[in-house]
Each structure stands twice: as structure tokens, then as C-alpha cells.
Image (cartoon, rainbow, N blue to C red):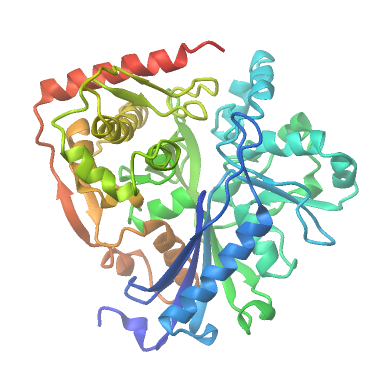
Amino acid sequence: TRFPRATLFPMQYILSLDQGTTSCRAFIFDLKGAVVASAQHEFAQYYPQPGWVEHSPVEIFGTQYQVCCQALAQGGVSAQQITALGITNQRETLVVWDRATGEPINNAIVWQCRRTAAFCEELKQRGWEQKIRAKTGLLLDPYFSGTKIKWVLDNVPGAHQRAERGELAAGTIDSWLLWKFTGGAVHATDVSNASRTLLLNLERGEWDADLLELFDIPASLLPRVLPSATQYGETHESWFGRKVPILALVGDQQAALFGQACWQPGRVKSTYGTGSFVLLHTGDKPLRGRGRLLTTVAWKRGQNSTEYALEGSVFVAGAALQWLRDGLGLLESAAQSEALARSVPDSGGVYFVPAFVGLGAPHWDPLARGLIVGLTRGTRREHLVRAALEAAAFQTRDLLAEMTIDSALSLRELRVDGGMAANNFFLQLQADCLGQPVVRPRQTETTALGAAFLAGLEAGMWGGLDELEQLWVPDRVFEPSAERSQVEAAYAGWKKAVELARAWPR
């Protein structure tokens, strides 16, 4: 039979938690990788100063628990039918909390936050960037959580002393959710999330003593580093009425790579959410790129070898449409962007560089600022919306160009997922921009699916990757069709616009 374990797990499901930058979601998957039920709820974003972004950890956990209960109720699934729970999360967002009370000592500092830009620049001037990159595979940027930990210890009164006494715990959102769901019994993270901190030695898969000393971070503050799929513990019975095994933690972009069945070197995916993240599977050895891409852990399953990826991170993609909707009132919904963009033949010479929190890869410029150029009296909202979609496509091309050089791998297609993957116009635009096929799977919730796959494999619900390969089914392939000369001319204009954004007075 195609699914031999169906008889071993009758009416059994996986609960997958997808904790994102703007919302918490919960999915219940069956043995065929189908969504039985799901729930989603947004939470508040805080901007206390220009370039600063914060979340409430208490609200995040409360919202995440709420959507879990809603998904179970919607699907008519009891907690007794949940074989395993997997967690995937926004990766570099930092929480520091009191071990005794379980209460955060400050708001979570979000991955988009730029407050540590000056400290990163100071370390660069002191010659640390290449040393840090050699150890971690990362660049010195406020994006990563290590400098955020130092900021909290230096700026929250008494925090450093309390950390030295072992009274505090720090971790990314996966660690925070794990701590809360286990009733404070487990303080751990997985290698994929740990590889995003600037503190993990990429080769050894453990916290690096030299970097902890550089950032003045007590080791007792940090979680244990475990494989992405392993026995993390169980939820406290007060949450779901029984103890549910937690068998997977994995960063959201690595989860999407796994959920897209990108298990062989050379397979690449792009997830379009708040930002846009392109990951290329590179195998069981970390590939050190020559350019400005990140070397990161993809995942580790139990005792298997660690697998790695090259990553390019765009900080603003779908968030640009959110801004056009919420900030300027030009859209009623993000979904409306497709019809508006289709209504004009081009962007009318308008370029939109959404560097609201600086630029990520391949520029890594935290001081760049967003701009819209090329405006005329004939510019309408349709042109601005189309320019926002083009910006996401152009930024993805920037990343894939770097990946092709760094990896020397032949990239035959781009697998896509995330909210913007529902926009057919955008995906055709992306295929035209790249000159390569863009493939959307039937199941586009690949981030949650990746966490479910990892948890289900650990539980024995699936026998291996060959069995899972049958569950990844393409929905549509977008082939490039635009005139190349027009595409190249538009892309040349984009690169000029980016240089203007980077030249903004600082």
C-alpha cells in the first residue's frame, strides 16, 4: 500500500504550530499531508523608535495556544488523536524571561529590529566580521539574535547580574514556546534556529565559547542545542488535557525547505511572507559562499548528519503590500494586488525599494531606507502596487544570481510558497524576471508542513523521505514568457533604484 503506516496510526494526526512575524497559525495534518483544519490570528506589532520592532511574548504564546484550540475544534480532532506536535517559528526574534516566574523581562526584539546596528558596525571596525563568519556562516548584522541578547543584558536594569546568577533564560521563539508548553520543564532549541544567533559554531553544532565571551553572554542563559527532529518533551497536561509529544523544532525557512521536498543538493525554494527567503540545499557539508549569502543549518534529524543550506534573506516582501494597505490605504486586501497590477501594462517607470528596515542580502545595509522613484503625474495606485510586486521578484533574482555563483550548482527551477504564492500574476512576473520555471505546489502551507513532516518522521508515522516524496505534488508551473530585453531593462532600473536607497543620507 502507498501509506503502510495508515493501519498503525488510524485517525491519528500531527499538530503543527507556525509562529510567524505577524500572526500565529496552527495546522492539523493527516497521513497524506493534507490539512484537516487550521486557524490563524494576528498579533500586535510595536515600533517604539524608528527602525525598532517588538512583539509581546505573552501575546504570542496566548495567541498560539488559542489557534491550536481553534484548529482542534474546527477539525473535530481530540488531543488523544494527536500523535506528535511540531513547532516552526520566526527565527531570529529574541525573548528573555525569568526562569522562576516564566515572565519575559522585556518585549521580544524582532528579527527586523535595527537597534544593534551601531554595535555591529563597531565589531566590524574591530575586525570581527570575518572571524564571526568563519565560525557561524553569518554576517555581522542586527538581523541575528546574538547582538539582541547583549542589548537586553546591557539595557534592561539588573539583567546581566540576574543572568550571571542563572535566574534568566534566553531563546528564540521556538525556545519560548517549548518552555511555555512544557510548563517550564525544557529549555532547548534546534540546530537550525541556533545557527541564526551569531553564537553557534557551525562545524561543531554547539555554542562557541569565544563568541559568548565577545558578546559577554553567560552560557547558562542559553538553551540546549538539539536536532530538529528528536524527543523534546511533552506538553503540560493542563494545555490539551493530556501530554502531547513535541518531536520537532525548526526555523520557518528551513521548515519550508523541508516541506518543499528540497532534500537533495541543488533544490531551491523561495518563501514569500513578511519578507522573502531563498534557501538552496547544499548537502551535508557547510558551503562557504564567496558572496554575501549566509551559510546556515538546514536541519538535523536524530542521529543523522547535519544538512546545510545557502540562504538569502529579503527583509520586506509581502510587508510592502501590507504597508500599501494599512499605511497608505491603497489596497483593501493584499489579494487585491493581483487585479490592480494586471490592470496596467507595466509600472510606468516606477520603482519601489521597500528598505523599511534596511536591506538584507546581498547588500546587508542596515542604514538603507525605502524609496519610491520614477513618479509622474500619470502615476496611479496600480503602478505602485505593481512596483511592489516587481520589487519582490527583483530581490529574489538578486539572491539567485549570488547563489548560482557561490554554489556552482545548476538551478533548474524555483519552488515557491507563502502568502504571495497565491498570486498568479506575481509568480508569472517572477518566472519572467528569472528566466526560469517557477513551481507552486498543491500544498502551499509548506512551512507548517515541513514541521509536520519532521515530527511525523520522528514518530514513525512515515517510513522515510521516499514515502514523503509522493506527497509533494505540483499545482502549477509558471514558464518564462516575457521579452528578455524588456526584462533586462527593467532589472537595470531596479539596480539603480537600490543604489539610491543605499545612498540616502545617514
Relative to 173, is 362 above or below? above
x and y, in percent, of residue 432 in the image: 17, 34
Q: Nearer the viewer, residue 30 or 53?
A: 53
Percent coordinates x, y for residue 37 in the rendering: 40, 74
In the picture, the quarter occupied by the C terminus is: top right
Q: Is residue 493 above or below residue 468?
A: above
Q: Position of residue 343 (x, y in %)?
A: 15, 38
The one nearer the camera, 209 or 474, is 474
Side (left or right) of 269 relative to 363? left
Residue 64 drawn above or below residue 287: below
Marker count (numbered):
0
Residue 428 appears at what percent x and percent y? 18, 41
Q: Is residue 146 above or below residue 69?
A: above
Front residue of 461/466: it is: 461
Residue 100 visible here = yes
Q: Residue at x 31, y 66 (%)?
A: 466
